[in-house]
Amino acid sequence: MAFHVGITFAEVEISGRRYRALVDTGFNGELVVSRRVAEEAGLRPFRTRERVLADGRVVKTGVAVAVVKINGEETEAFVEILDELPLDVLIGVYALERLGYVVDPRTGRLEKIGMYLL
C-alpha cells in the first residue's frame, strides 16, 4: 500500500483575524507569519532568531508571542515573522504537538490524538 504525501491546511486565528495556514511537519517551530500578517495582528517582536530555509539560505526572523487558535483551539505560541514568506501563515510541528494534533497521511487533515504526560 502506498501513501501520497499531500498538502495540509488549517484555520488559524491570530488577534481575532482568520487565516488559512499551511501545515509543515518539517518545520521545527510553532508558527511563521508574513510581515503583512504580523502588522495586521499587531505582533511586536521581542528578539530575533536565525533560521535556515529549505534552499540553504540563513535568514533572521523576528519573534513575538501571541495567543492563537488552530482549528478553534487556543494556545500561546512563539510566532516568527519572515519578510519573504510567500504565504500568510505556516504551522510547525511544535504548535501541533502543543495542541495534540498530527497530520493523518490518509486524509491530509489534522487529527486530534490528545496529549500524553510521560
Image (spheres, helix red, strand yellow):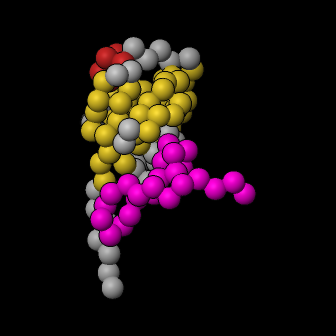
With respect to residue 39, does 63 lie above or below?
below
Residue lying at the far bottom of the rendered structure = 1
The residue depicted at 30 percent of the width and 24 percent of the height is: 17
User: Residue 67's x, y, as percent?
Assistant: 48, 26
Q: Is residue 58 visible?
A: no
Corner quadrant of residue 70: top left
User: Residue 49's x, y, as percent?
Assistant: 55, 29
The residue depicted at 44 percent of the width and 39 percent of the height is: 73
Whether residue 47 sits left or right of residue 70 in the image: it is right
With respect to residue 8, does 10 lie above or below?
above
Query: What is the quadrant of the N terminus in the image?
Result: bottom left
The span picked out in magenta is 95-118
The residue depicted at 37 percent of the width and 48 percent of the height is: 23
The residue depicted at 38 percent of the width and 26 percent of the height is: 14
User: Residue 80's x, y, as percent?
Assistant: 46, 30
With respect to residue 22, does 12 lie above or below?
above
Q: How many marks?
A: 0
With respect to residue 53, does 40 lie above or below?
above
Q: Is residue 60 magenta?
A: no
Q: Is residue 13 visible?
A: yes
